[in-house]
Image (tube, rainbow, N blue to C red):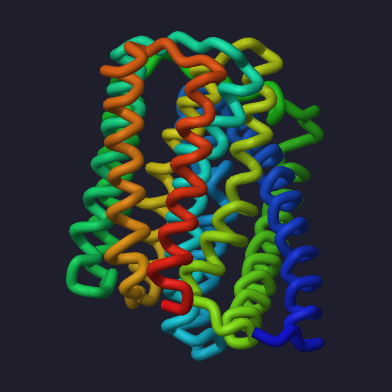
Amino acid sequence: MPVTPRSVVAVLVGGVSLYLLLVSTRVTVQRLVNVAQGYGVSESVIGLTVVAVGTSLPEISANATASVGILTGALDAGVASATVLGGSIGSSVVQQTLLVGVFLFAAGEVTLSRSFVRSSYVPMMLSAALVLALSADGEIARLDGLLLVGAFLVYLYYTYDRRERATVPEGLEVRNVGVRTDAAIALGGLAVVLASAYLVLSALEVLVASLDLGGSLVGIATLGVGTALPELSTVGESIRRKRPTLALGTLVGSNVVNLLVAVGLGGVISGYSVPDAVLYWDLPVMLAIGVGAFIYVTRVTDGELNRRDASTFVVAYFGFVAGHLLLFPSS
């Protein structure tokens, strides 16, 4: 796997673009929250829509941009499909394992109620199972994408109908300078998000070709980790505010958005081909990790988690990556 000047440039461009993607996502979500508040939208609705979808905006924009690139021929369909699917699944696994481990190391001891665990983990497991089932034929077609987006709308209704009044995280509360100004900044931020996502995907496509690695593996190792960073900031804010359930709820809930909205939207726009690595390793192992975490939290620890449990989640992440690398290095 020779390192070429082209691959070095791709790394630099991809790194800068990923940084712009994350920063512009933050700005866009902040301003959209202000616009919603300016029109009198309740905080519970804002929390369920703008904030929930906003933290997954990098994954959503990457999938949407990849799908448009596939339609126009600007991106290779096979590589783009593998990369964004690997990125979405990788981001979900990072949040379920690595970020939960980091959170437990930092927070110390956390007590979770059975009702909280059920309401958080069950939708996540069902989302993973649905994506796996729809991918069984080797593709995510437009109808499959519609089913995923429809499932998210059902989840949204179910959650809104049963949850307590939500609040907007403090980290997203900024001075309201006017609805029109906020809307203009949000639109500008969204344009930067989409442009950055395209540059990231183009850079990753170059890396896949230069290093002879599988698109899904590159997506897991780069896009998956990078796009999970907004959730890491939410974890830090939740620890500071001593609200552990907010952190875990965000991490688990973001998995639902990644799988149903990001992958679903990409499926609606262009459809995806699902590589063997995703079908036979990434998706099944992601589902197994979710089920295993649910059993571990409810049966083994009885909702009592501490720093000793953090290592279990961290090891699960590196096991996921190592298994993919060993079994499907270039798929």
Q: Is residue 224 above or below residue 39?
A: below
Q: Would residue 204 be found to the left or right of residue 87 on screen?
A: right
What percent of the width, then of the height, locates residue 186? 69, 49
- Quarter holding residue 48: top left
Total label count? 0
Q: Quadrant of the N terminus?
A: bottom right
What percent of the width, then of the height, locates residue 293? 35, 31
What percent of the width, then of the height, locates residue 280? 28, 64
Near-viewer residue (154 or 127)? 127
Q: Would residue 4 be found to the left or right of residue 190 on screen?
A: right
- Quarter holding residue 170: top right
Q: Quadrant of the C terminus?
A: bottom left
User: Who's the residue at 57% across and 43% down the image?
Assistant: 54
User: Who's the residue at 36% across and 10% down the image?
Assistant: 113
Q: Is residue 139 above or below residue 172?
A: below
User: Who's the residue at 26% across and 50% down the image?
Assistant: 150
What percent of the width, then of the height, locates residue 185? 75, 50
Q: Residue furthest front?
A: 326
Near-viewer residue (125 or 157)? 125
Q: Is residue 178 above or below residue 94?
A: above
Near-viewer residue (3 or 123)? 3
Report if residue 183 is visible in the image: no
User: Who's the residue at 59% across and 87% down the image?
Assistant: 209
Report if residue 106 is visible in the image: yes
Q: Would residue 289 be found to the left or right of residue 173 on screen?
A: left
